[in-house]
Amino acid sequence: MNKKQKKVLIRIIIAAVLMVALLLLPLEEESILRFVLFLVPYLVIGYDILKKAFKGIKNKQVFDENFLMAVATIGAMALGEYTEGVAVMLFYQIGELFQSYAVGKSRRNISALMDIRPDFANIMEAGQLVQVDPDEVEIGTEIIVQPGEKIPIDGVVVDGSATLDTAALTGESVPRSAKIGDEVISGCINMSGVLTIRTTKDFGESTASKILDLVENASSKKSKPENFISKFARVYTPVVCYLALGLAVLPPIVCLILGMDPMWSKWVYRALTFLVISCPCALVISIPLTFFAGIGGASHEGVLVKGSNYLDMLSKTKIVVMDKTGTLTEGVFQVTKVSPTDISMDELLEKTAMAEVFSNHPISRSLKEAYGMPIDSAKVTDVEEVAGAGIKAVVAGVNVAAGNEKLMTSLGLDVKPVEEPGTVIHVAFDEKYKGYILISDKLKPTSKEAIDVLKRAGVRKTVMLTGDSRHVAEIVAKELGLDDVYSELLPADKVTKVEELLSSKNDNEQLLFVGDGINDAPVLSRADIGVAMGALGSDAAIEAADVVLMDDDPKKIAKAIGISRKCMRIVYENIYFAIGIKVACLILGAIGIANMWFAIFADVGVMVIAVLNAIRALRVRNV
């Protein structure tokens, strides 16, 4: 409990003790002394509410909960209902204290869950280890990270080796190793060994800072329920004030016209009760708190949602479209077969690897790794990449073409389909077919389970998009149990397919695309929700997507959808509960069944219940 909350608690205790003491004193019901004595606890507990209400009137922002409480309690005091006037203010402050504590607790929980911002960096000065502010460390500085400390800034290990705990970033407790030459990111905890790291980024641009900024700024992107509540409160509060005024004035006037007793005090009391009941605190507080808790809880699980609007959209996901490489498969290509025609295996592999020397594509890297010898790039000239087909180059005077069946067809060569799972690289020398190389990419161990979980969660269509051959794509799709697969696609073709799927979906459905956040940036942007997978340390992925999965487990897709649905369920529970109770109590108050004590429950009690329900959104471990 902070200092401000402690002060409010002390005021609550003093006001409560004074009110109980006054109730025990034998005071005359309508005496001036009784009014003055009850005014003391009233002002002790309510002076700040009265002050805020006055400021609101002064700034022409009249209709808020402070105005409602001020009018209701001043009216009660004026009618001689001193006990109820003090009680309304007292219980309202108790509710506000509880709400403040709950929000603070939620923020502390999220801070603890996202406890990745380092407090210091160690640098060596004159042979001594000195702790400095990470903001002061320049790019290229060598920092020391000891066991048990957080890596403060992204960089490259230049000395030492250690095991790193990335749980705060990914939500998973599986440790990762770091050795000389490895890139490491801020927010990881060094579990063993001393590391010397040369920084490659400023502190503000490091992964930990970016993630924290993303989570902290997520509240700026409002969901439909939040926007609805904001608009609702702006209209609702003035309306209930005018209704209360009408309830206080119109029935007595009608009574006067009919020659009956107007009973002004009775109708004014009902109007004041109506005002207390109508206070929209439960909605205004609990809905944003639910989204805040949901986003924070998701962050702890390594699911970064960039705004509550995306949390809302995620809950309506019915179509999940996935890239293959790196999303459903490991993305680690290996040469599994070399099948030459009229030449040796070594020559086929050597010339193909040399033709790919300037490419950084994963397939090219796997060919070079399989060759395993230094490549003299001076022997490679006239390199031409053929989009969606392969590569052409002159290698030591030989025209080498390596790629798929389309490339061979363009050379006038007729090749037989290879009925084996994997990516097939057909090779031709001087326009003569020389065989093929088979490259395989393993499925992730959790991919099939991820698809099963998505279907159980109500996703009606799962689709895979890939640039691989139709044969390979269909084998993968069948093994995983996907509904549809589209193969041999260029990046532009993937956008077209996503647009076709978008046009076929219902208005209340959302299409989610999962990719690596870099190569699939156009598709991520075009989908209703773009999800970047395995984005640990990838700035491009964090920038490109609406939702970022910090590790590469496809089950996190279903996890993200599950978290969003739990959060939205709590949001609508609070909306229906708060509005339902308010409407019922307002009707009871207007007809005189509900008194001021009943109104206190309708205001404070409903708010407390709604806030407690909202905090449930923090617990997402078993979603």
Image (cartoon, helix red, strand yellow):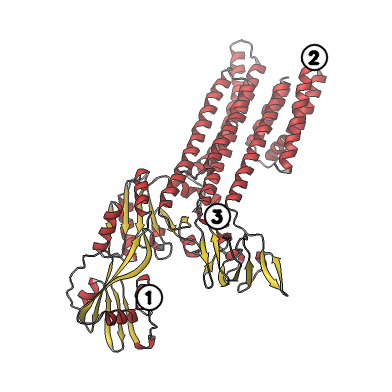
| Number of the front mark, 3 or 1 | 1
Q: Disc 2 on helix, strand or loop?
A: loop
Residue at label 3? 168
Q: Position of residue 535 (x, y in %)?
A: 47, 61
The quadrant of the rendering that contains the N terminus is: top right
Residue 520 lies in quadrant = bottom left
Residue at label 2? 28
Residue 386 in sight? yes
Q: Position of residue 334 (x, y in %)?
A: 34, 69
Furthest residue to the front? 193
Give the mark, 3 or 1, whose residue is nearer the N terminus: 3
Residue at label 1? 369
CA gap between label 1 and label 2 equals 97 Å
Could you say which disc has been placed on residue 243 in the image? Answer: none
- Is the Cβ of the residue at disc 3 closer than 8 Å to that at disc 1? no
Residue 197 appears left or right of 76: left
What residue appears at the point 67 percent right and 17 percent down from the top-left corner?
A: 265
